[in-house]
Image (spheres, rainbow, N blue to C red):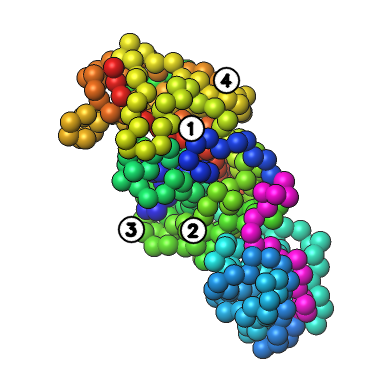
């Protein structure tokens, strides 16, 4: 299954060193936008040329009319593309999605197959009579949006200082949770084993989208042993807007109806400081310099005051062989300070190498139209290093 319901997958933010706090504004806008569509309607037989104005039209460009297969577009210039409308066969108003090498953007109700332009004020398309989540209570899906800065990529055999991911899965309602492995606030565990609450996943169409203002993150359907999942590719720092509200737009498929869940996710802010600062040394020659006390280690960060949990995860490795020897996970409020106790660190011998994750972890639980719950996870983090003293 492609969905990662844990913090153990590396996910990234910004350049080496600390990333300043960023807020959603014009400078943080996504690279792909749709500013105009002309004409915005055409015959159900298709075949007419449609011109789309916007930004980010680079590389391979496709346009999807509603749930149909994407069709190739031609760039007229940096801000304009042309595409031939496909066959529809019925009168309908559909979303218009442009995908390029820089990402994707969707204009809701952007094109009408018929004799009149689309009604752009016709709502969010969330009421189509479908039964998302089986029409009952319980958890019926997960969507994750993650960003983590990697202070020393070479320390972990990586080539990038950051990685940004988005993925999702949908299933029949169950009583479990995707985030039950997180300890309660103010406590720690030495076994952060994760499990999924469902083993069979539902088809929600070809795409699902996370959208905030001009940001549109498209997740493409992929195949897994338990059924279809959804995953974005090629994301970078500019795709993740901090302190922003994201809606989840489900295109709709044979198992899950089309729906827009407004305000499904709230992304945390970034970091301006983490202490001990030497956890963030950036090369294999200087890394693993932070001395982490077996008697308990205090950590601090700024800014603080987020509404989600703050998590410190430590993976320990044998200092000679590099073999994993243990892990510890502590959760608390985002109040700027946390001490990882000796009950977590004390069993690791001096000289053990540590991978230390500092994570703001925001979990929202919006509802599908059916009443079932979607668990929406957004996280921002930094991965550093240390050595047990």
Q: Are marks 3 and 2 in contact (CB under 8 Å)?
A: no
Residue 89, can we see it?
no
On the rendered structure, is 197 left or right of 252?
left
Residue pictured at 54% horizontal, 73% vertical: 60
Which residue is disc 2 drawn over? 234
Q: Residues within 10 Å of mark 3 (few under 14, many from 20)?
A: few
> If you read the primary sequence from the N terminus, does the residue marked by circle 4 or circle 1 appear first?
4
Q: Residues within 10 Å of mark 2 (few under 14, many from 20)?
A: few
Q: Are marks 4 and 2 in contact (CB under 8 Å)?
A: no
Which residue is disc 3 drawn over? 225
Residue pictured at 71% horizontal, 52% vertical: 213
Is 164 situated above or below 267? below
Which residue is disc 1 drawn over? 359
On the rendered structure, is 7 left or right of 84?
left
Which residue is disc 4 drawn over? 335
Q: Which picture quadrant has residue 9?
A: top left
């Amino acid at each position: 299954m492609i969905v990662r319901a844990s913090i153990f997958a590396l996910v990234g933010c910004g350049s080496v060193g600390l990333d300043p706090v960023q807020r959603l504004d014009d400078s943080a806008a996504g690279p792909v936008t749709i500013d105009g569509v002309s004409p915005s309607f055409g015959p159900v037989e298709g075949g007419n040329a449609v011109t789309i104005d916007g930004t980010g039209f680079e590389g391979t460009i496709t346009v999807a009319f509603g749930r149909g297969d994407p069709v190739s577009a031609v760039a007229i210039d940096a801000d304009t593309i042309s595409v031939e409308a496909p066959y529809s066969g019925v009168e309908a108003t559909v979303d218009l999605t442009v995908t390029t090498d820089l990402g994707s953007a969707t204009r809701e109700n952007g094109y009408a197959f018929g004799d009149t332009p689309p009604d752009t004020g016709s709502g969010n398309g969330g009421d189509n009579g479908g039964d998302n989540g089986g029409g009952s209570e319980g958890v019926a899906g997960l969507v994750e949006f993650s960003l983590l800065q990697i202070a020393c990529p070479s320390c972990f055999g990586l080539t990038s200082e950051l990685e940004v991911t988005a993925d999702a899965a949908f299933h029949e309602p169950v009583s479990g949770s995707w985030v039950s492995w997180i300890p309660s606030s103010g406590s720690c565990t030495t076994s952060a084993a994760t499990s999924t609450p469902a083993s069979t996943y539902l088809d929600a169409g070809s795409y699902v989208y996370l959208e905030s203002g001009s940001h549109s993150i498209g997740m493409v359907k992929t195949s897994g042993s338990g059924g279809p999942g959804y995953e974005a590719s090629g994301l970078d720092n500019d795709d993740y807007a901090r302190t922003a509200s994201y809606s989840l737009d489900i295109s709709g498929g044979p198992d899950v109806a089309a729906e827009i869940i407004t305000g499904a996710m709230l992304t945390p802010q970034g970091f301006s400081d983490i202490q001990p600062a030497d956890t963030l040394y950036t090369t294999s020659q200087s890394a693993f310099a932070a001395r982490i006390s077996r008697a308990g280690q205090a950590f601090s960060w700024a800014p603080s005051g987020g509404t989600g949990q703050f998590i410190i995860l430590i993976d320990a490795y044998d200092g000679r062989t590099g073999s994993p020897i243990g892990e510890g996970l502590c959760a608390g409020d985002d109040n700027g300070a946390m001490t990882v106790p000796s009950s977590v660190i004390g069993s690791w011998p001096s000289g053990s190498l540590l991978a230390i994750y500092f994570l703001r972890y925001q979990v929202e639980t919006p509802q599908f139209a059916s009443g079932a719950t979607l668990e929406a996870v957004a996280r921002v983090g930094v991965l550093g290093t240390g050595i047990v003293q």
